[in-house]
Image (spheres, rainbow, N blue to C red):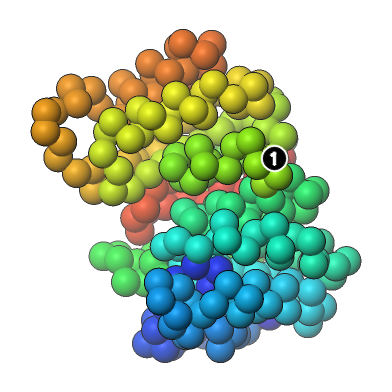
Amino acid sequence: MRIGIVAPGTPVTREVADRVIAIAAECQPGLTLHFHPQCFLVHNHFAGPDAARADAFVEVANDPAYDALWVARGGYGACRIAEDVLARLEAPARTKAYLGYSDAGYLLAGLYAAGFERVAHGPMPGDIRRAGGEAAIRRALGWLAGDREGIEPHAVPGTPRAAFNITVLSQLLGTPLQPDLSGHLLMLEDVSEYTYRTDRSMFHITANPGIRAVAGIRLGRCSEVPDNDPDFGESEEEVVRHWCARAGIPFLGRADIGHDADNKVVPFGTA
């Protein structure tokens, strides 16, 4: 099984690539990982210019020699190329698995909206830099190899679900990337956002008619929340509960996802 790795947002280092390849060789010898050279480009904030990032994604997605496309890391940049990428995907792209989270949510949303069936929110190679990151890499590799051990416990077969970073989901709503999440369990997480910004994003998310059709929301971890002056006075869970109640969306509790090494895999859809 051959996994192609591209960086739609920010770059990774060759050290990261080497470490992830070594872990794969040890725990999933049936997988072959190929980091596209684009992953190591640096152009301003990004892993190469927009065209280079889009071309790398399309190249791997459309190549029948690859069984999956794994997003190298988040950061920022996927929204700049997502519509261009989606317009250029061909039949072989529909047979692949796609794995990533955070900024990759723009692409995951667009793929799912376009009917791609093997899309998942889960760990990326860049997570090897986190404390305990090796476990995250092994979890992702396991899912790519076909096991379910690393899947978030509430993502049970037969129940449609999806997962996003709160800020990313808020930004993509109302764009061509927005998928139909009617009847879905929606899991949300975030990182490095002031609580008032999470509150503002949840206002926008829960006001969207498509989101009001979800079966319910579960909240993952909101980590590295900056201190606000004055104190916002509510936790992230209180914020999400507040907006769910106002919108009539069931709040179903917590989810085991987040910007950390414990981030579990959430396959979109019912699989």
Which residue type does callout 1 highlight?
A: Pro
- Name the quarter where the C terminus is drawn: top right
At 38% across and 16% down in the image, what residue appears?
A: 242
In the picture of the structure, the residue carrying the numbered disc 1 is 179
Q: Is residue 157 above or below residue 71?
A: above
Q: Is residue 114 left or right of residue 267?
A: right
Residue sitting at 28 percent across and 31 percent down?
196
- Specify the farthest residue to the right: 91
- Compared with residue 107, is residue 159 higher up or lower down, i.e. above or below? above
**Dot 1: what SS?**
loop
- The answer to whether any part of residue 57 appears in the image is yes
Q: Quarter of the image holding residue 29?
A: bottom right
Along the horizontal axis of the image, is 126 left or right of 56?
left
At 42% from the left edge and 52% from the top edge, which residue is drawn?
A: 263
Note whether 253 is above or below 124 in the view shown. Answer: above
Q: Position of residue 203 (x, y in %)?
A: 44, 24
Can residue 138 be seen? no
On the image, the x and y values in percent for residue 14 come to: 42, 88
Residue drawn 73% across the image and 79% down it: 59
* Side (left or right) of 228 relative to 165: left
Query: Measured from the top left, where is residue 45 in percent x and y?
Result: 40, 72
How crowded pointer 1 is (Cα within 10 Å; few <14, some 14-19, many 20+) is rated as many
> Residue 231, position in %: x, y?
13, 28
Q: Quadrant of the N terminus?
A: bottom right
Please tell me in which quadrant of the rendered image residue 44 appears: bottom left
Task: Count up the numbered dots.
Answer: 1
150 over 138 or under it: above or below? above
